Amino acid sequence: MLLAYVEPVEIAKKSTVIFNNIDYGAIFDYAVNSLCKSLGIIYVSGSTYANNIDICLYSGLLNDPCWTCSNLTHDSFKFTNQELEHFNDIRSFLKENALISGEKCQSIIEECINELNIVLPSQSEFSTLFMPLYQKKVLQLLLPQSIQNYQSIEFIPKDRSFPTRTVGSWIGVCLSGSCLIVNTWIKYIMKNKNSTFDINKPFHNWIQINLSMFDGSYYTTGFPNEQDPNCPICSNAKQMVKQDS
Ligand SMILES: [Zn+2]
């Protein structure tokens, strides 16, 4: 998906919804969300951890919230002190610790080095100056206005995976999560087709389920469909529409 990025973009252009269960990291989710917003299509994300399942649905509509309205991306651009101990060269460090690679990443790295005027950053310059600038540039490149234009998106960081072997995340949870992302999408379509539904009532686009509840039940929670006025993805999608009209 990251390397042959052109293909999923072409498929997305013919789709009405994208389901994302891929555990690559927050910036991958940020990119998929931006792609959906740029196309005005539905984004359903599902994640599982231990016995928990979280499902979120975002309509892709201009005035509705998106994934970025309620999620942060800073941690994906940070490294632990233990990781930083082995810092030597920017390119090899980013490749080894965050799977950042490809032609585009080379040009972003060069831009950052030139702007900061540091050729060989120290460990602290790397984490306090270089990485925040790299983050700013990557998030800018992934905005709806340009998200459809790349050959590959290998310049995004991969998050470290949590060790899940001892806490569950067994097939029952994963399979339930996969079924529920489709279920959430169908519920959303039925809501929109239902003429008696009060559109002023917020749609609960967040479902959290814990399969280990003692009575075998589950609970759902929701938050109002409110957009963050400072969300870069939502703002950029609106700007695109303004420019076109
Ligand atoms: Zn947003």
Image: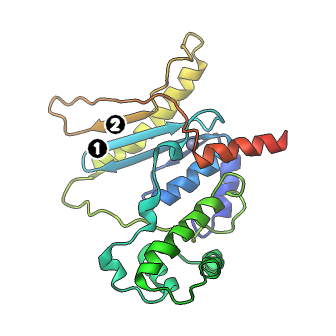
Label 1: element kind: strand
Residue 168: percent from the left, percent from the top? Answer: 22, 53
Vertical comparison of 94 with 202: above or below: below
Vertical comparison of 231 with 166: above or below: above
Q: Residue furthest front?
A: 117
Residue drawn where x is 62% and y is 43% of the image: 234
Label 2: element kind: strand
Front residue of this view, candidates 128 and 160: 128
The answer for how far apart the CA atoms under marks 2 and 1 are is 7 Å
* Crowding at mark 1 (Cα within 10 Å: few <14, some 14-19, many 20+): some
Front residue of this view, candidates 210 and 61: 61
Give the number of the disc on residue 208. Answer: 2
Residue drawn where x is 64% and y is 69% of the image: 152
Q: What amino acid type should be assigned to the residue bearing mark 1?
A: Asn
* Left or right for 107, reference 175: right
* Left or right for 125, reference 152: left
Residue drawn where x is 42% and y is 35% of the image: 206
* Left or right for 214, reference 227: left
Indicate the quadrant of ligand 1 in the picture: top right
Judging by the rendered image, the residue that carries numbered circle 1 is 52
